[in-house]
Image (cartoon, grey):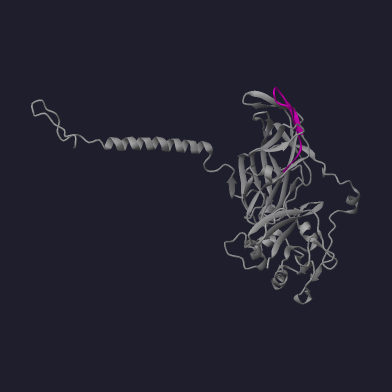
C-alpha cells in the first residue's frame, strides 16, 4: 500500500489576505513540484485525497506536536508520519481548496469507501489525530492533507472567513498595498517599534525583527568573455526610509512565510566603482525599494527563499550601461547563495551579506542588493509574552553569517602550518647528524674508512 501525506499549515501573512503554507512529505514518491490544488483535482477513488482538518490547526500547533524544540521523540501519529517520511518539501497556496463533493467523516462509523476526496474533521487536534489514525490505514493509495478547516471549502465544515470588507471588495487590487509615508533616518528596524513617529503595537508571540544599517548596490555586466562587477556602498547616514502597514509580515511561530520590505531613499549622489574606476552613479532622491521573503520550515531551519525588487536604477559610466529594475521577482534558485539562513529560534547577524541579483531592463546587466550590518529574527523562543510586550529585542542566540574560519583565516593557518612543518623537518634533520668516533690526526695512523661500512 502506498500512502502519501501532505501536512498543510495555515497562517495569516497579511492584513488583507490568507495564505497557506504546506509541508509535503511522502514515503514512496518524490512530490516536489506537485501543487495541492493539482493533487485534489486529480484525485480518484483509486488514489483519493484525504483532508484531515481541525478549526485551530497552525504550524505552531504542529511544531509542538512534533516536539520540534525537544530531543524527546514524538508520540503523535500525524507528527510521526511527517518526521518518518522519505521525501520532504514545502509549498504555498493562496486560496482554500474547493472540495464540495468530498465525503465528510466526523466518526469512524460514517466512513464509506469509494470516494475520490475525504474530509476527516475533528473539533481539535486530539480528536482529529485519533480519527485519522483509525481511518487513514483503511484508505489505500491515499494522499493525506493535514490542514485547517477553513482551508477546505465544504458546506458541512467550512467556516468562511471574510478577510476583506465590502469596501475592499470594490477597491482596486493594487499590488502596491498601503501607501508608504514618512522619511525616517537609518538604522531601519522592522516592525518600527523604536520609531515614536510610527504607532506600532507589539503583539504576544509576534517576535520577528529586522535591523539594517546600510546597503550595497552591485552591478553585474556580462561581456563577451566574462562578467564584470562594480559596487557602491550606501551608508545609513546617506539613507532614509518610509514605512507602510504590512512592510513587516510576522507569524506566531518560527514556521511559515515571513517578509520584510525596505523602502530606502538616497540623499546624496553616490558613485559605484570597479576597483578605482567609476562605473555607475545613483542620484540624490533615487530609491532602493525591495522585499525579502523568508521561509521557516518544520525541520528547524529558515532561509531567504525569494525577493522582489520594486524599484532601483543606476546610470552607467564608461563601459557600464544604465539599467533599471521594477517589480522583478526572484525565487530560491537566485537567493540560495545569499547566506541569509539560520536555525529556528536563532537570529542571523551579518556584517555584509552576499548580493542577491535581479534581472534589469538591459539584457546584459543585473543589479544586486547586499545588506550591510543587519540582523534578522523570525521568532524569539526565549522571550515570554509579557517581556516581549514590555521590551522588543533580539534573542541572545545569534549566528554570524561569517563562519569561524574565513578564507583569509584559512590562508594564514595553512601558511603557518607549512612553515612550522619545514622548521620541524629541518630541526629533526639537524638532530640526526652524528659526529665521528675518531678525528684525523697527522701524528697518528691515517684513518681508513671501509666503503662497505
**Vertical order, 64 against 178 (above or below):** below
**Image quadrant for the N terminus?**
bottom right
Image location (x, y in percent) of residue 307 = 72, 43
**Image quadrant for the C terminus?**
top left
Foreground residue among 337 and 19: 337
Image location (x, y in percent) of residue 224 = 67, 28
Foreground residue among 450 and 342: 450
Q: How many marks?
A: 0
Foreground residue among 452 and 28: 452
Residue 9 within the segment the image draws in magenta: no
Residue 322 within the segment the image draws in magenta: yes
**Vertical order, 254 against 124 (above or below):** above
**Vertical order, 383 against 323 (above or below):** below
Foreground residue among 122 and 140: 140
Is 339 on the left-hand or right-hand side of 260? left
Outermost residue on the front side: it is 452
Image location (x, y in percent) of residue 152 = 80, 62
Decide if residue 97 is in sight here: yes
Decide if residue 191 is in sight here: no
Question: Residue at 20% of width from left, 34% of height from top?
Answer: 435
The image quarter in which residue 436 lies:
top left
Outermost residue on the bottom side: it is 109
For the stretch drawn in magenta, the main secondary structure is: strand
Question: Residue at 46% of width from left, 38% of height from top?
Answer: 413
**Vertical order, 394 against 212 (above or below):** below
Give the magenta part as a residue range.
Answer: 307-324
Question: Residue at 84% of width from left, 68% of height from top?
Answer: 156
Amino acid at each position: 500500500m502506498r500512502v502519501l501525506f501532505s501536512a498543510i499549515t495555515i497562517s495569516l501573512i497579511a492584513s488583507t489576505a490568507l495564505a497557506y503554507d504546506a509541508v509535503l512529505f511522502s514515503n514512496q514518491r518524490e512530490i516536489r513540484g506537485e501543487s495541492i490544488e493539482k493533487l485534489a483535482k486529480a484525485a480518484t477513488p483509486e488514489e483519493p485525497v484525504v483532508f484531515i482538518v481541525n478549526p485551530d490547526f497552525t504550524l505552531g500547533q504542529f511544531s509542538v506536536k512534533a516536539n520540534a524544540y525537544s530531543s524527546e521523540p514524538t508520540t503523535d501519529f500525524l507528527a510521526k508520519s511527517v518526521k518518518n517520511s522519505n521525501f520532504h518539501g514545502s509549498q504555498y497556496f493562496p486560496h482554500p481548496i474547493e472540495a464540495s463533493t468530498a465525503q465528510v467523516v466526523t466518526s469512524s462509523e460514517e466512513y464509506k469507501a469509494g470516494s475520490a476526496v475525504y474530509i476527516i474533521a475533528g473539533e481539535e487536534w486530539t480528536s482529529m489525530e485519533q480519527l485519522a489514525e483509525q481511518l487513514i490505514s483503511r484508505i489505500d493509495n491515499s494522499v493525506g492533507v493535514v490542514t485547517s478547516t477553513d482551508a477546505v471549502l465544504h458546506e458541512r465544515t467550512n467556516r468562511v472567513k471574510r478577510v476583506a470588507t465590502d469596501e475592499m471588495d470594490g477597491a482596486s487590487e493594487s499590488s502596491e498595498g498601503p501607501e508608504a509615508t514618512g522619511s525616517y533616518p537609518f538604522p531601519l528596524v522592522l516592525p518600527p517599534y523604536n520609531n515614536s513617529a510610527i504607532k506600532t503595537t507589539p503583539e504576544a508571540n509576534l517576535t520577528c525583527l529586522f535591523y539594517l544599517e546600510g546597503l550595497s548596490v552591485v552591478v553585474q555586466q556580462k561581456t563577451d568573455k566574462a562578467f564584470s562587477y562594480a559596487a557602491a556602498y550606501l551608508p545609513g547616514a546617506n539613507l532614509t526610509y518610509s514605512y507602510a502597514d504590512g512592510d513587516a509580515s510576522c507569524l506566531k511561530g518560527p514556521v511559515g512565510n515571513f517578509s520584510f520590505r525596505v523602502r530606502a531613499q538616497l540623499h546624496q549622489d553616490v558613485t559605484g566603482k570597479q576597483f578605482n574606476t567609476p562605473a555607475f552613479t545613483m542620484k540624490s532622491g533615487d530609491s532602493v525599494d525591495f522585499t525579502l521573503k523568508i521561509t521557516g520550515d518544520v525541520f528547524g531551519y529558515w532561509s531567504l527563499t525569494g525577493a522582489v525588487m520594486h524599484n532601483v536604477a543606476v546610470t552607467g559610466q564608461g563601459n557600464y550601461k544604465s539599467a533599471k529594475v521594477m517589480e522583478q521577482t526572484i525565487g530560491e534558485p537566485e537567493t540560495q547563495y545569499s547566506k541569509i539562513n539560520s536555525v529556528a529560534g536563532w537570529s542571523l547577524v551579518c556584517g555584509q551579506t552576499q548580493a542577491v541579483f535581479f534581472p534589469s531592463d538591459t539584457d546584459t546587466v543585473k543589479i544586486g542588493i547586499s545588506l550591510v550590518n543587519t540582523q534578522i529574527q523570525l521568532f524569539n523562543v526565549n522571550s515570554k509574552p509579557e517581556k516581549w510586550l514590555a521590551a522588543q529585542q533580539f534573542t541572545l542566540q545569534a549566528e554570524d553569517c561569517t563562519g569561524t574560519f574565513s578564507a583569509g583565516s584559512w590562508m594564514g593557518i595553512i601558511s603557518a602550518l607549512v612553515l612550522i612543518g619545514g622548521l620541524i623537518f629541518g630541526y629533526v634533520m639537524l638532530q640526526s647528524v652524528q659526529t665521528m668516533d675518531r678525528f684525523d690526526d697527522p701524528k697518528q695512523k691515517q684513518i681508513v674508512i671501509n666503503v662497505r661500512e
